[in-house]
Image (tube, rainbow, N blue to C red):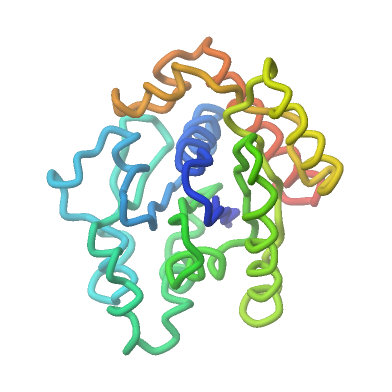
Amino acid sequence: MAKVISFANQKGGVGKTTTAINIAASLAAIKKRVLLIDIDSQGNAGTGLGFVRAAHKQSVYGVLMGTATIVENILTTAIPNLHILPASAKLAGAELDMEGIENPEYRLRDAIKSIENNYDYILIDCPPALGILTLNALNASDYVIIPLQCEFFALEGVQQLLSTITSIQQRWNSKLDILGMVLTMYDKKLGLTRAVEKDVRDTFGDKVFKTVVPRNVRVSEAPSYGKPALFHDFKSPGAQAYLRVATEVVNALEQRGIK
């Protein structure tokens, strides 16, 4: 049965989608069967894996609306072991479109049940907002990974997200747990970066992954080639960092007795 992990942070520009893409690719590279679900209307996860939105009709939108099955909307990527359920611009109106649907917060969870045995990992890239789409993702998930940019306001947004996660645990999904926080866009030359890292580690301790993802040109340019950093420049510091984070993810689950 697949381990379902959401990547969430309501603050934009923290490297959330980049982290989801690259951890998905890294897990696939170590021969794990991976499905990446893009539930963000911007659709950047699909773009980062080489998909042009106008070139395919598949989307998670129909799955959420109940007009299509999840199986018929999954696409095979150029990376062995990695599939994607892409987003649609229609997701921007999901809040209104799902108002008349019974139990809308469980749509993604219920859809995943039919394919959870086909994968080792199902990763969900959430939008930078705490609305119905993120609620669907977190209700479907066993774990959440929180990417944090090394900047002054890093901790501010996390507190709101943690409050939301607690509410979800109490009301909808008691099994949801924080697998870890990953520090992104790390620049060791900057005193602010080191200060933010200290604050985050002092506050959250071992919930923060040991590996930090450096600010790296190869990681930034990889989406324009439709590739994860690992397949754009394997030896780049960013690609190697994400590979180490993926290893930490696997190890963290094994420590919980989950393989």
Give percent across and percent down for residue 95. Answer: 35, 75
Residue at the far top: name it: 235
Q: Nearer the viewer, residue 59 or 166?
A: 166
Q: Residue at x 29, y 75 (%)?
A: 65
Q: Nearer the viewer, residue 72 or 236?
A: 236
Q: Does residue 181 appear to the left or right of 48 in the view shown? A: right
Q: Residue at x 58, y 62 (%)?
A: 141
Above or below: residue 59 compared with residue 204: below
Give percent across and percent down for residue 192. Answer: 70, 29
Q: Residue at x 86, y 42 (%)?
A: 202
Give percent across and percent down for residue 12. Answer: 47, 48
Above or below: residue 153 compared with residue 187: below
Q: Residue at x 73, y 23 (%)?
A: 191
Hey, which quadrant is residue 194 in on the image?
top right
Residue at the far left: name it: 55
Give percent across and percent down for residue 26. Answer: 53, 30
Q: Does residue 236 appear to the left or right of 98 in the view shown? A: right
Q: Does residue 101 appear to the left or right of 135 in the view shown? A: left
Q: Does residue 42 appear to the left or right of 19 in the view shown? A: left
